[in-house]
Amino acid sequence: MIEQTMLSAWSSTFQLLPLSFLVGVLVMHFVSNGFGVLWLVLAGIELDQLGFSDAPNVFSYALAAVVMWFLAQRVFTNRSVYAMMGLGTVGFLVVTVIHTVSFSLRGVGVSYLASLPAEWAIFLVALFVSFLASRRISVFMRTIFLVRNV
């Protein structure tokens, strides 16, 4: 809901940021794969129920979550920036393909395709910046609470 209400008030660049999907990737990468899948499925349900988008978000987010869960279990097993960028890229590719097919079948794909390069660029930059910020916050919190690295 924050994605559609708060970001829509900002400039057109930030309106393209898929915040719920970005947070889902971060949850899958830093917390657990199960919580990440749950977040993405619930985010898709919320976006469809609130009617903010004409895209089939439940299907696209759920399929992306399943693909990302499989990749996190088999391919991207370490918790590096490359793993998170790979998960986010593949997951967002699944969502993009499903949305493109859906919009093309309804005849409104041209306007959606025009914003894809900017949406991809914003998503990848935000994913990388959020990885760096979460690492800094994690190190800062460990020093404050004197948690040993185990």
Image (cartoon, rainbow, N blue to C red):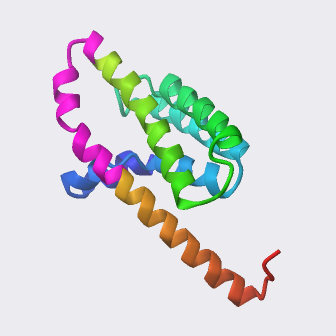
Is residue 55 visible in the rendered image? The answer is: no
Which of 104/43 is in front?
A: 104
Question: Is 150 left, or right, of 21 in this rendering?
Answer: right
Q: How many marks?
A: 0
Residue range highlighted in magenta: 104-123
State the residue at coordinates (63%, 75%).
138
Image quadrant holding the C terminus, namely: bottom right
Main SS class of the magenta portion in the image: helix
Q: Is residue 14 above or below residue 111?
A: below
Is residue 142 visible in the rendered image? The answer is: yes
State the residue at coordinates (71%, 82%).
142
Question: Is 114 left, or right, of 18 in this rendering?
Answer: left
- Image coordinates of residue 85 in percent, x first then y, are 48, 51
Q: Is residue 17 above or below residue 142?
A: above
- Image coordinates of residue 13 in percent, x first then y, are 22, 54
Q: Quadrant of residue 148?
A: bottom right
State the residue at coordinates (62%, 38%).
71
Residue 27 within the segment the image draws in magenta:
no
State the residue at coordinates (54%, 53%).
84
- Image coordinates of residue 117 in percent, x first then y, are 23, 42
Question: Is 43 left, or right, of 7 in this rendering?
Answer: right
Which of 53/60 is in front?
A: 60
